[in-house]
C-alpha cells in the first residue's frame, strides 16, 4: 500500500475534486480503502417491469418507447421504457440537452431507483441509468453496490470509480499483514486485503444485516486494527512520559497529615488508597499521569487538594483546571477555604475576567507568588507563563480530551522537566471504554461513598402529575430542606418541546409564592450565576430553578430534592450527574424524573436504569450500550478519537484482546507497532506526541 500517495495520482482527480474529498477525510489514496459504505444496494438481479412493486429499490432494463418534455408547473423530462412484460416512466426535473438527446426510441437502458406510483403507472424519479447495447442484456453488477458517505459535489458514481482505482492499486500491491498470525487465527479474521475488498464489493449472497450492523468478520478485522493503532499511540505516550524528567515531590508529608487531621470528616479507605497511589507517583522523578474515577460525591476534590498541598510544600506551583466557570469557581472557593489557613491564597483565572484582575493574576503566576492557580481552559492560553508549574489537576477530564490537557502540561515544561498530571472524572467509565480512551493514564478508582450517605431514591412521573410534584416541593421546603428544579433550556423553543427554565421559574413563582425561588442558567454573567448559587448554598434561596449548568461540582448538603424536567430527552450519565447534586447530606434525598408521554423504548430503559441503581459504573455501562461512546464522553468537545471503522460501544469486547496484542507487539515487534500506528493515524499521532 502506497501510504503517502496523494489523491491527485488517481485518474480524474484534480485540485478542485481533491478539495471536496477532504471533507470526507480523504487525503491519500489509501484513505479511500477505509471509506467504508454506509449501506449496500442489490443491483445483481434484474426485476421485470411487470413485477414492480411501489417502494422497492431495484434494477430494471428496457427499451426507450417515448421521450417528451412537458411544462406542468415545472419542466419535466418523461422517458417511457418497456421490456415486454410492462412499462415504466422515468421522470427527470434537472436535465441537459445532451442528456435529453440520449433517450432516442429504440435505445436500451439499465436503471436503478425507487419505484413510485404515479398518475400513469409506476415511475422512477431521477434514477441512476446507463445506456447499454441490446446484447448486453441488463448489464447488472456482479457484487452488491456500495453507498458511501456523501459530500456536496461528489456523486456516488465518482466515489465508486475512485474506490475501484484504489482497490486496483491494492490488488497489485497488497497491504502488509501487520497483525500476528496467531491473533487473526484465534479471532477467525480474514487478511486485511480480503477484508477491504469484501467490504467495498460484497458478493450477492453477503449477509447484509451483519454488514449494516458492523459485526461482519471483515469489519471486525478492520476495527480491531484501528483500535490497536489508537491504543498503541496512547501507550507510547505513556512510555514517553516514563522517560521524561519531573521534579520528585518527596516532601510535604507532615503538611498533608496536618491537613487531613483538620478535616471535619475522616477519609474513606478508597480515598486513602488513592492518596497513597498519588504520593507514590509524585515522589518519582518522572511525571505522574493518573486518572481518578469516582462517582458523584465520592470525595475526589479533597484528594486533589492533598496532592496540591504536597506540591506546594515542595516549592512548585499547582494548577487546577475545570471545564465551566461555575465548577472552576466552586473549586476556587473550596480550595480557598482549605488553603487560607495554610497561608496559601489561590489565584483565579478565567476568560471572562476583567482586564485589571487578569493582569494581576498573570503577574502572580509568572513571578511565582501564585502557588495555587484555579481556572478554566484560560490556563493554557497564550500569555499565561508559569513560574514553576509542578502539578496539573484537571477536573471533568472527559470534557477536555488528550490534546487540551497536553497543552496545559506543555505550559509547565522547563529545565527541570514536565509537570505531574492528575485528571479526575465523575463520569464513571466502563472498563473497556477506559482502556481505549485513557490508555496513556494510570487509573485509580474511588469506589466508596463517605459514611452516612444514603442512596437517592428515584421515581419517574409523567408531566400530567406536575401539580403533585409541585406540592412535594412545597412540603420539602416547608420542612427546612432545599430543592432543585432542572430544565434543559433557558427559554421556550419552537423546535423542541422542552419546559424552559424561565417558564418553569414563572410557573413555580405563581404556584409557590411563599417560597424564596432563584434562577440560574448558562447565559447569565458569571457574577450573577455565582450570586445565585451562593444564595442557594447559604439557604437564602429554598428552590433553585436551573439549567444543566449545575450538572457538576455544586455542593449544597441541605438540598434533598431534585426535579428534572423532560428527563426522557437526556442521557443516562447526565441524569446521574444531576441526581448527584442531592444526597450530599445526612437527610434521605429524592430525585423525580418528570417525563412527557408516550415514552420510546430507549427512554423507558434509561429511566428504569436510574430507578434501579445508584451505581455510576452500572449507569455508565448502560449509557454506553444505549447511546455509544461519543455521547457518553462528549466526543465533539474532547480528544476522544474519531474512529473511521471502529465503534467503541459495538466493539468493546475486542479491547481485552487489543490490549494483549499491543503489549506483545511493543515487547517483540516495535517496528510492526509503529507501522500499524502509521497506517491508521498517519505520520504522527493525533495526540501530537508519537
Image: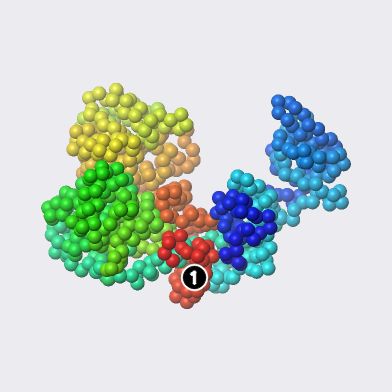
Residue at 68 percent of width and 58 percent of height: 11
The structure residue drawn at horizontal position 23% and vertical position 32%, both measured from the top left corner, is 542
Circle 1 residues within 10 Å: few <14, some 14–19, many ≥20: many
Residue 277 visible in the current orientation? no
Query: Residue 240 vs residue 183: left or right?
Result: left
In the rendered view of the protein, which quadrant contains the N terminus?
Answer: bottom right
Q: Nearer the viewer, residue 105 or 362?
A: 362
Q: In this view of the protein, which residue sits in the foreground, 462 or 171?
A: 171
Question: Looking at the image, which is closer to me, 534 or 363?
Answer: 363
Residue 267 in the image: x percent, y percent? 20, 56
The spot of residue 246 in percent (x, y) is: 28, 68
Instruction: Name the residue carrying label 1.
Output: 673
Check the image and report above or below for 563 versus 402. above
Q: How many marks?
A: 1
Residue depicted at 81% across the width and 42% down the height = 102
The residue depicted at 22 percent of the width and 53 percent of the height is 363
Q: How is the image coloured?
A: rainbow
Q: Position of residue 449 (x, y in %)?
A: 26, 52
Look at the numbered disc 1 and give the secondary structure of its residue.
Answer: helix
Q: Is residue 489 visible?
A: yes
Q: Is residue 376 above or below residue 444?
A: above
Coordinates of residue 611 in the picture (x, y in percent) = 37, 42
Compared across the picture, whether 348 is left or right of 254 comes to right
Q: What quarter of the picture does the C terminus occupy?
A: bottom left
Amino acid at each position: 500500500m502506497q501510504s503517502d500517495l496523494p489523491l491527485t495520482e488517481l485518474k480524474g482527480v484534480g485540485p478542485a475534486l481533491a478539495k471536496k474529498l477532504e471533507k470526507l477525510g480523504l487525503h491519500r489514496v489509501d484513505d479511500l480503502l477505509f471509506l467504508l459504505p454506509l449501506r449496500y444496494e442489490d443491483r445483481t438481479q434484474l426485476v421485470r417491469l411487470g413485477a414492480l412493486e411501489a417502494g422497492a429499490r431495484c434494477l430494471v432494463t428496457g427499451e426507450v418507447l417515448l421521450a417528451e418534455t412537458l411544462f406542468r408547473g415545472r419542466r419535466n423530462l418523461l422517458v417511457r421504457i418497456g421490456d415486454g412484460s410492462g412499462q415504466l416512466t422515468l421522470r427527470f426535473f434537472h436535465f441537459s440537452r445532451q442528456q435529453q438527446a440520449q433517450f432516442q426510441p429504440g435505445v436500451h437502458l439499465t436503471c436503478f431507483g425507487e419505484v413510485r406510483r404515479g398518475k400513469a403507472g409506476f415511475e422512477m424519479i431521477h434514477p441512476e441509468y446507463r445506456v447499454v447495447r441490446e446484447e448486453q442484456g441488463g448489464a447488472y453488477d456482479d457484487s452488491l453496490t456500495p453507498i458511501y458517505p456523501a459530500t456536496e459535489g461528489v456523486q456516488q458514481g465518482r466515489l465508486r470509480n475512485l474506490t475501484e482505482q484504489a482497490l486496483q492499486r491494492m490488488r497489485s500491491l497488497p497491504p502488509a499483514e501487520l497483525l500476528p498470525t496467531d491473533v487473526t487465527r484465534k479471532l477467525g479474521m480474514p487478511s486485511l486485503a480480503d477484508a477491504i475488498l469484501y467490504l467495498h464489493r460484497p458478493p450477492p449472497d453477503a449477509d447484509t444485516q451483519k454488514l449494516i450492523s458492523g459485526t461482519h468478520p471483515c469489519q471486525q478485522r478492520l476495527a480491531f486494527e484501528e483500535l490497536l493503532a489508537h491504543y498503541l499511540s496512547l501507550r507510547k505516550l505513556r512510555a514517553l512520559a516514563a522517560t521524561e524528567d519531573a521534579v520528585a515531590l518527596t516532601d510535604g508529608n507532615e503538611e498533608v497529615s496536618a491537613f487531613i487531621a483538620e478535616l471535619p470528616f475522616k477519609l474513606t479507605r478508597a480515598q486513602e488508597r488513592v492518596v497513597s497511589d498519588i504520593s507514590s507517583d509524585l515522589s518519582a522523578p518522572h511525571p505522574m499521569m493518573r486518572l481518578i474515577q469516582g462517582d458523584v460525591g465520592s470525595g475526589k476534590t479533597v484528594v486533589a487538594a492533598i496532592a496540591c498541598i504536597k506540591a506546594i510544600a515542595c516549592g512548585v506551583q499547582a494548577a487546577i483546571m475545570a471545564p465551566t466557570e461555575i465548577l472552576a469557581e466552586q473549586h476556587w472557593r473550596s480550595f480557598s477555604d482549605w488553603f487560607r489557613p495554610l497561608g496559601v491564597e489561590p489565584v483565579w483565572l478565567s476568560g471572562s475576567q476583567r482586564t485589571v484582575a487578569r493582569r494581576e493574576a498573570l503577574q502572580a503566576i509568572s513571578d511565582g507568588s501564585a502557588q495555587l492557580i484555579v481556572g478554566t481552559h484560560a490556563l493554557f492560553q497564550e500569555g499565561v507563563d508559569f513560574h514553576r508549574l509542578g502539578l496539573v489537576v484537571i477536573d471533568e477530564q472527559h470534557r477536555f480530551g488528550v490534546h487540551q490537557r497536553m497543552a496545559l502540561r506543555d505550559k509547565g515544561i522547563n529545565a527541570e522537566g514536565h509537570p505531574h498530571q492528575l485528571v479526575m472524572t465523575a463520569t464513571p467509565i466502563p472498563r473497556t471504554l477506559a482502556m481505549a480512551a485513557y490508555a496513556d493514564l494510570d487509573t485509580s478508582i474511588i469506589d466508596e461513598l463517605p459514611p452516612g450517605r444514603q442512596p437517592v431514591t428515584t421515581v419517574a412521573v409523567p408531566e400530567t402529575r406536575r401539580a403533585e410534584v409541585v406540592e412535594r416541593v412545597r412540603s420539602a421546603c416547608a420542612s427546612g430542606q432545599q430543592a432543585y428544579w432542572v430544565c434543559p433550556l433557558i427559554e421556550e423553543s419552537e423546535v423542541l418541546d422542552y419546559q424552559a427554565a424561565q417558564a418553569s421559574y414563572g410557573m413555580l413563582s405563581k404556584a409557590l409564592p411563599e417560597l424564596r425561588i432563584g434562577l440560574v442558567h448558562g447565559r447569565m454573567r458569571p457574577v450573577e450565576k455565582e450570586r445565585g448559587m451562593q444564595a442557594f448554598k447559604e439557604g437564602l434561596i429554598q428552590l433553585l430553578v436551573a439549567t444543566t449548568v449545575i450538572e457538576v461540582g455544586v455542593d449544597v448538603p441541605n438540598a434533598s430534592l431534585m426535579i428534572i424536567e423532560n428527563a426522557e430527552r437526556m442521557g443516562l450519565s447526565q441524569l446521574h450527574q444531576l441526581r448527584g447534586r442531592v444526597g450530599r447530606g445526612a437527610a434521605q434525598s429524592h430525585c423525580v424524573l418528570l417525563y412527557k408521554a408516550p415514552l420510546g423504548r430507549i427512554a423507558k430503559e434509561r429511566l428504569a436504569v436510574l430507578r434501579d441503581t445508584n451505581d455510576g459504573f452500572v449507569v455508565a455501562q448502560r449509557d454506553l450500550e444505549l447511546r455509544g461512546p461519543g455521547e457518553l464522553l462528549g466526543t465533539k468537545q474532547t480528544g476522544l478519537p474519531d474512529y473511521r471503522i471502529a465503534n467503541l460501544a459495538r466493539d468493546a469486547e475486542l479491547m481485552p484482546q487489543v490490549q494483549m496484542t499491543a503489549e506483545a507487539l511493543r515487547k517483540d515487534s516495535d517496528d510492526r507497532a509503529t507501522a500499524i500506528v502509521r497506517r491508521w493515524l498517519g505520520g504522527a499521532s493525533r495526540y501530537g506526541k508519537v
